Amino acid sequence: MTINMICIYFLLRGEVNVVGSYVLKVLSYGLIIGFQHYNYNANKAFFYFRNAGYGIDKLYLYALTCDALAYGVLLSLLKLFKYWVSVF
Amino acid sequence: MGQRILKTDSVHLEFDGRKILQDIYLSCRQGEVVGLLGRNGCGKSSLLRIIFGTLKPSYKHVSIDDRYVYKGYDEGRVAYLPQHNYLPQNIRIENLAEIIIDPQFVDGFTSLPIYQDHYRKKPSQLSGGELRQLETLMCIYSRADFILLDEPFTHVSPVQAEMFKGVIRKCAEVKGIIVTDHQYYNILDVADRIVLITDGSTKAINNPDDLIRYGYINHII
């Protein structure tokens, strides 16, 4: 959510376009995965999810896909809101 | 459905050119407890991690009902109690339990004092001993068909060890359990069958005197 807010902030200021904001998000995903992969404590908690029957790759895939979709919806609503404000 | 059988065969594992495991055969059927013994560094934990799927050896053949298993944890077939803490620290225990506990054992698990006392807390709020007890019980009561327990009796009081053994026996009525620990008397007590890892290979132990013969212990306590 923090990353979404940062991306939207730069987008609204006009410093990046939509494609640029998605590139920023993909880079942040890489940072998150990298941090969790090399962070010993984060790595230990993976065993809980594996014991519950969830593969870590699938967890990342689902979580990041949901995040990217949520970001898209949030972005569309903001664009729509800005358009309505400019019309009315 | 009949009893499933987990088989591990032809494992080859080496670190820095040193052969750790080379002639391994280990099987476990649902309904039995297999005790795994061996000296420090002989590869017990590595073997469990290979079965679970978090350690990749040069070669392995792990199967359940003769179907090759790439990673034991896929589809929740195998659960593993590591030696370190594994619960996420900032999720409430009742929420963690809801996902992992086998529905047929929910009543048994939720009636345990350790759960009753702390289910609204987060793991980060528990003491080291309480957390280890909870993690061990969550693993034993998990949904998996096969449970791998790496040193469940270490750092645990004798009363708790007795309680764990009762839970292991209860769950082993429907699950296959492989348990390893240096407290060999607890393993001898709880296991239906004992396997010793020595010189990188597995040896079946038919009576406690075999442990002396293979040099694992000097005398039986």
Image (cartoon, coloured by chain):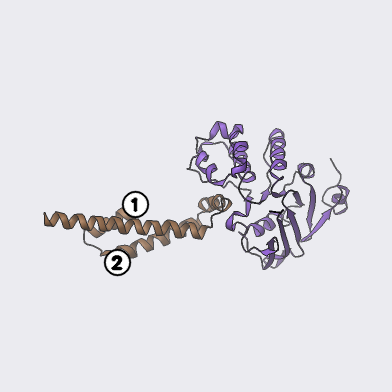
Chain colours: A brown, B purple
Q: Position of residue B189 (x, y in %)?
A: 79, 41
Question: What is the quadrant of residue A64 in the picture?
Answer: bottom left
Single out the residue that lies furthest toward the front: B1
Q: Residue at x 17, y 58 (%)?
A: A83
Is residue B217 something one can see in this rendering? yes
Q: Residue at x 72, y 34 (%)?
A: B158
Q: Position of residue B102 (x, y in %)?
A: 60, 45
Single out the residue that lies furthest toward the left: A88
Is residue B153 something one can see in this rendering? no
Viewer-side residue, B8 vs B18: B8
Q: Residue at x 61, y 61 (%)?
A: B71
SS at circle 2: helix
Q: Residue at x 30, y 57 (%)?
A: A73
Image disc number at residue A2:
1
Q: Position of residue B191 (x, y in %)?
A: 77, 46
Q: Earlier in the sequence, mark 2 or mark 1?
A: 1
The image shows a total of numbered marks equal to 2
Report how far apart the C-alphas of labels 2 and 1 lie in the structure.
18 Å
Label 2 and label 1 in one chain: yes
Q: Residues within 10 Å of mark 1 (few under 14, many from 20)?
A: few
Kind of residue indicated by mark 2:
Val
Q: Is residue A41 left or right of residue A70?
A: right
Image disc number at residue A19:
2
Mark toward the viewer: 2 or 1: 2
Look at the picture and state if B30 lies above or below B124: below
Viewer-side residue, B77 vs B22: B77
Q: Are marks 2 and 1 in contact (CB under 8 Å)?
A: no
Kind of residue indicated by mark 1:
Thr
Q: Is residue B185 left or right of residue A78?
A: right
Q: Position of residue B182 (x, y in %)?
A: 74, 46
